[in-house]
Image: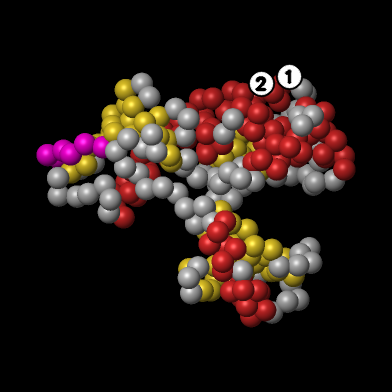
Amino acid sequence: MAQKTYQIDDIGKVTFYKHRASKTIRIKLNGGTVKVTLPSWLPYKTAVEFVKKRKQWIANNQAQRLPFIDGSIIGNNYRLRLISSNSSNFSIQEEGSIITIAVPLDQTSESEAGQNRIEKYITNILKRDAENILIPMARQLANENNFNLSSLEIKKLKSRWGSCNNKKDVVLNLYLIQLPDTHIKYVIFHELAHTVHLNHSKEFWSLVEKFVPDYMTIKKEIKSHSPDIVVSRP
C-alpha cells in the first residue's frame, strides 16, 4: 500500500494511504492522529486539498487525550497519584486501585519527558491486566464455541482493536481492557469469526451475529472509542 505523510497547517502530520479498494477519500481520526485513505488512481494533491477543506470538521471531532495529572482517573479501575521524590529516577507503586508515581525533584510530570514516562508505566499496567483477563476470556470463548486458534497475544495496536491472520493468530489490543464487557466480547468474537472467514462477507457477519446478536449497535458505539489510554478527571 503506497503512502505519504504531509504536514498540514492547523492539523499537523497527516498520513495518506492509497488503496485499490477505496472508491472515495476517507478521513479517519484516532485520538490526535489523522489518517486518510484514497483510491490508488487519485493524486495525493487532490486528497491533501480535500483534507484542508475539512479542517474545521477535523478540529471539532478530533479527540485529544487529557494530560496525566495528580488525581487523573485511568480507564475504569485506577486513580493516578503523582508525588515528588528526592530520587534521581521515576518510580511506581501500586496499591489496590491507586497508581503512585514518584517524580524526581529536578523534573516535572507536565514535561513531555514526564508525560511519556507516566504513559509507559500505565501502558505496562494495562497490558498486564489485559494479559491476565482478556487472554483467558478469549480462550474460554473459543473453546466453548469450537473456534480453533493458533496463538493469542496482547499488543499495542494503533488503530485496530484486534486482528487475525490466515494462520489463525489472534491479537487483541491492550487498550481493549478499558472498554465495557459487551464491547470486549464483540471484539473477541469478531476476531474469532475471522478464523473461519478471513473477510467481512455476509457469512462472516452472520457468524458474529450468532454470538453477538446486537453487534450492529456495538459496532457503531465502539467507533466513539479510540485505542488509547482513557484519561478522565475526578
> Which stretch appears magenta?
82-88
Looking at the image, do the residues carrying marks 1 and 2 touch, with CB atoms under 8 Å apart? Answer: yes
Res 167 seen here: no
Instruction: Point out residue 147 in the picture as x, y percentages from the top left corner.
Output: 75, 28
Query: For this rendering, which residue is in front, 14 or 50?
Result: 50
What's the CA distance linking mark 1 and mark 2? Answer: 6 Å
Dot 1, how many residues are within 10 Å of its Cα: few (below 14), some (14-19), or many (20+)?
Answer: few
Number of numbered discs present?
Answer: 2
Q: Quadrant of residue 5?
A: bottom right
Image height of 67 relative to 206, above or below? below
| Residue 169 rendering spot, x and y as whole percentages | 66, 39
Residue 87 part of the magenta segment? yes
Give the numbered dot on residue 11: none
Instruction: Say which residue appears at 27% left-offset and 54% top-offset.
Output: 111
Q: Secondary structure at mark 2?
A: helix
Residue at image position (61%, 23%) is: 137
Question: In this orientation, does residue 59 appear?
Answer: yes
Relative depth, front residue between 104 and 70:
70
Q: Residues within 10 Å of mark 2 (few under 14, many from 20)?
A: few
Q: Which residue is mark 1?
A: 144
**x, y percent for residue 123:** 42, 40
Q: Is residue 22 left or right of residue 129?
A: right
Q: Which residue is mark 2?
A: 140
Q: Disc 1 residue type?
A: Glu
By what rule are the colours in the image chosen? Answer: secondary structure
